[in-house]
């Protein structure tokens, strides 16, 4: 059995904390209270950042340092955590503000958080704002002065004056929620919903603990692609295109057409991965399905990839490059095949779709980096066979054989189920070319599956599938006739030097965006009491009453069906005199402008991307007024001009009238500065507030 100390701590917990937190060199240390680091326990920088921000909220820290919380611990609140979160946080604040530690190890607090919020168990990276939201809610319920919550019916405005409805909403909120967290962090929204059918207007006033404001997002994105022209003399070109974020593949083709002069109808877009076609895109597919890390190739073609019976237009064939490699077999009798280089989409005239014609078309398309053999190199096999076959195998030719038909809409296709009548015509009657007793060619051709990993035969089950052709090279022939350097070469278009600059935005713009009218999503409709059905109503949020400490969460993380990204836009936020008078719609007290002006006191920063990142904190010490940079257990002083950066994620602002009150002689004489330690705020003050 143990008894709680007068300062609210438990002897066993204090002993454990001291053993973990104090090193020998810190026993005689005496420093500035509050200038204390927090050790990273393993990906807990998100927790350290949130704690440092909250620890530097003056009135909340004074509330715990002066033991005001002991009288308000609510052990029986079913929504609370039996007072344990409040006690653990109080212990942490007292150690950090004792001035006896350079840094402390928040083991006890971490364990308490994991015990009551399983999502924070273990040592995975999390979001500092999510931890902050949980902590504020947990502290509120553990310190709620309302021991038994009464049932309160929410009432709509029903045409009554806003002032009356807001006052009623705030009083109803305070009847169930009354704590230092409410006194310090809670404000009031005005929410207006309008039914699109009957025009019914619903006005409610709802409390909030922080503002999650969106960042103005550009509706454009930059995509890098490689353009492969049909002319074999032209190298592939790298292009940087500006396309609409919510556009389609056809928009990408239109943008590329402006750079190349090639009609969008003559383009096919493919995602190339590991020397094969990972995906062939349809023109109507959304651009959001293309990720920034994908290698996108756009091919100039003169036909369609799905052959239509009776049509005379060219046939587009996917072609892979493979090299035979000796396998590690006992007698080296088996050869493996390895993909290499970039695959091709080759347009073949229908009247030349034979093995011989396809070979010649490919020789023409590869002519930039494949050398045509001399006649002396072609003496392989029986001379008699050579004489018989000489007229059957035409050499590579460009004279009119690769004519351009009338351009027609070209749509990429995965080609898995398309009917291929030319296979039924037995134009490609054998699975491999050249057949036996044919004079030696540079490479052989093979029908393969879409991955290029296994050969295909023209069995009845496969004749309806889109043929993929593989060019198989012998190692010696590849070394002799195939120029790898030239094959991999490309040129950069002038547009590659273009960089879409992200102009900085002002914090006020984010708040304006937060208060603009929006239409509810299909997944979250509103039930109209007049129409008696769910509607996609328009919704508008307005600020009615602001708290003493205003927390502004910048929504930097964007989630869509296909991607997750972090917005690294620079948000310009003022250190002093952030004026909310233009955003608060409650009738204002003109005699006291400090009620609408705020000064910055802390910033939670996030560096890095979605998967890996690091959290730090800028905070202003309530006693010295000096700004410090908290990076886990490291703390260093900084200048105000270092605070604003692209990493700013959660901003803490203090209302100027509160700062003046805390600096007054009454607030600095050792008397508790928090309203929770003195008499509760009057209703008149809360109305103005």
Image (tube, helix red, strand yellow):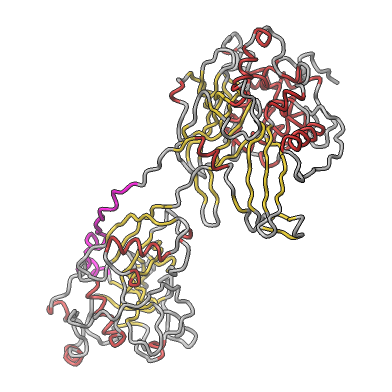
Residue 321 visible in the snapshot: no
Q: Position of residue 147 (x, y in %)?
A: 86, 30
When asked about the image quadrant of residue 11, the answer is top right
In the image, is 503 to the left or to the right of 619?
Answer: left
Work out whether residue 339 or residue 647 is closer to the camera in this orientation and state it: 647
Q: Position of residue 64 (x, y in %)?
A: 71, 19
Q: Is residue 35 above or below residue 115?
A: above
Q: Is residue 486 magenta?
A: yes
Q: Position of residue 631 (x, y in %)?
A: 52, 26
Work out whether residue 454 or residue 59 is closer to the camera in this orientation and state it: 59
Magenta stretch: dominant secondary structure: helix
Q: Residue at x 31, y 83 (%)?
A: 433
Which image quadrant: the N terminus? top right
In the image, is 516 to the left or to the right of 343?
Answer: right
When asked about the image quadrant of residue 16, the answer is top right
Which residues are the magenta region?
Answer: 475-499
In the image, is 135 to the left or to the right of 573?
Answer: right
């Amino acid at each position: 059995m143990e008894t709680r100390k007068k300062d609210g701590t438990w002897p066993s917990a204090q002993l454990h904390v001291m053993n973990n937190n104090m090193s020998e060199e810190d026993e005689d240390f005496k420093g500035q209270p509050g200038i204390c680091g927090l050790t990273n326990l393993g990906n807990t920088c998100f927790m350290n950042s949130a704690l440092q921000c909250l620890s530097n909220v003056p009135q909340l820290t004074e509330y715990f340092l002066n033991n005001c919380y002991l009288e308000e611990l609510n052990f029986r609140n079913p929504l609370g955590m039996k007072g344990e979160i409040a006690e653990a946080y109080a212990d942490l604040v007292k150690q950090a503000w004792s001035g006896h530690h350079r840094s402390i190890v928040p083991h006890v607090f971490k364990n308490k958080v994991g015990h009551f919020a399983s999502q924070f168990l273990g040592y995975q990276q999390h979001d500092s704002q999510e931890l902050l939201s949980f902590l504020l809610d947990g502290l509120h319920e553990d310190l709620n002065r309302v021991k038994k919550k009464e049932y309160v019916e929410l009432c709509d405005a029903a045409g009554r004056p806003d002032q009356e409805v807001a006052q009623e909403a705030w009083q109803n909120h305070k009847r169930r929620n009354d704590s230092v967290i409410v006194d310090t962090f809670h404000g009031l929204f005005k929410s207006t919903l309008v039914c699109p059918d009957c025009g019914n207007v619903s006005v409610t006033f709802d409390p909030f603990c922080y503002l999650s404001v969106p960042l103005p997002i550009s509706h454009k994105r930059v995509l890098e692609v490689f353009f492969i022209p049909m002319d074999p003399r032209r190298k592939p070109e790298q292009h940087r295109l500006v396309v609409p974020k919510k556009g389609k593949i056809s928009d990408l083709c239109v943008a590329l057409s402006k750079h190349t002069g090639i009609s969008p109808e003559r383009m096919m877009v493919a995602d190339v991965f590991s020397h094969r076609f990972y995906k062939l895109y349809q023109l109507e597919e959304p651009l959001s399905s293309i990720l920034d890390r994908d290698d996108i190739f756009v091919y100039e073609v003169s036909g369609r990839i799905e052959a239509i019976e009776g049509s005379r237009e060219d046939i587009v064939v996917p072609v892979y490059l493979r090299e035979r490699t000796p396998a590690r077999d006992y007698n080296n009798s088996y050869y493996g095949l390895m993909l290499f280089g970039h695959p091709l989409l080759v347009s073949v005239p229908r009247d030349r779709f034979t093995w011989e014609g396809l070979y010649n078309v490919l020789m023409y398309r590869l002519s930039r980096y494949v050398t045509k053999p001399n006649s002396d190199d072609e003496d392989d096999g029986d001379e008699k066979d050579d004489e018989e076959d000489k007229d059957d195998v035409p050499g590579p030719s460009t004279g009119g054989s690769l004519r351009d038909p009338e351009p027609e809409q070209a749509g990429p296709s995965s080609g898995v189920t398309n009917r291929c009548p030319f296979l039924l015509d037995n134009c490609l009657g054998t699975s491999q070319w050249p057949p036996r007793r044919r004079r030696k060619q540079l490479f052989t051709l093979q029908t393969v599956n879409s991955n290029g990993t296994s050969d295909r035969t023209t069995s009845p089950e496969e004749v309806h599938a889109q043929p993929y052709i593989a060019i198989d090279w012998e190692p010696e022939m590849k070394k002799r006739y195939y120029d790898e350097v030239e094959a991999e070469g490309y040129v950069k278009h002038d547009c590659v030097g273009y960089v879409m600059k992200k102009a900085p935005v002002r914090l006020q713009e984010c708040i304006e965006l937060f208060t603009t009218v929006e239409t509810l999503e299909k997944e979250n409709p509103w039930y109209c009491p007049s129409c008696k059905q769910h509607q996609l109503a328009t919704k508008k949020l307005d600020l009615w009453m602001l708290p003493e400490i205003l927390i502004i969460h910048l929504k930097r993380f964007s989630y869509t069906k296909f991607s997750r990204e972090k917005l690294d836009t620079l948000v310009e936020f003022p250190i002093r005199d952030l004026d909310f008078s233009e955003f608060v719609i409650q009738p204002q007290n003109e005699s006291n402008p400090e009620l609408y002006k705020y000064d910055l006191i802390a910033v939670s920063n996030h560096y890095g991307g979605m998967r890996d990142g690091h959290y730090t904190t800028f905070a202003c010490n309530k006693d010295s007024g000096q700004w410090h940079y908290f990076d886990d257990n490291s703390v260093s002083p900084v200048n105000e001009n270092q605070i604003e950066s692209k990493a700013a994620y959660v901003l803490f602002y203090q209302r100027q009238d509160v700062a003046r009150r805390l600096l007054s002689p009454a607030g600095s004489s050792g008397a508790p500065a928090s309203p929770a330690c003195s008499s509760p705020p009057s209703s008149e003050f809360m109305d103005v507030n």
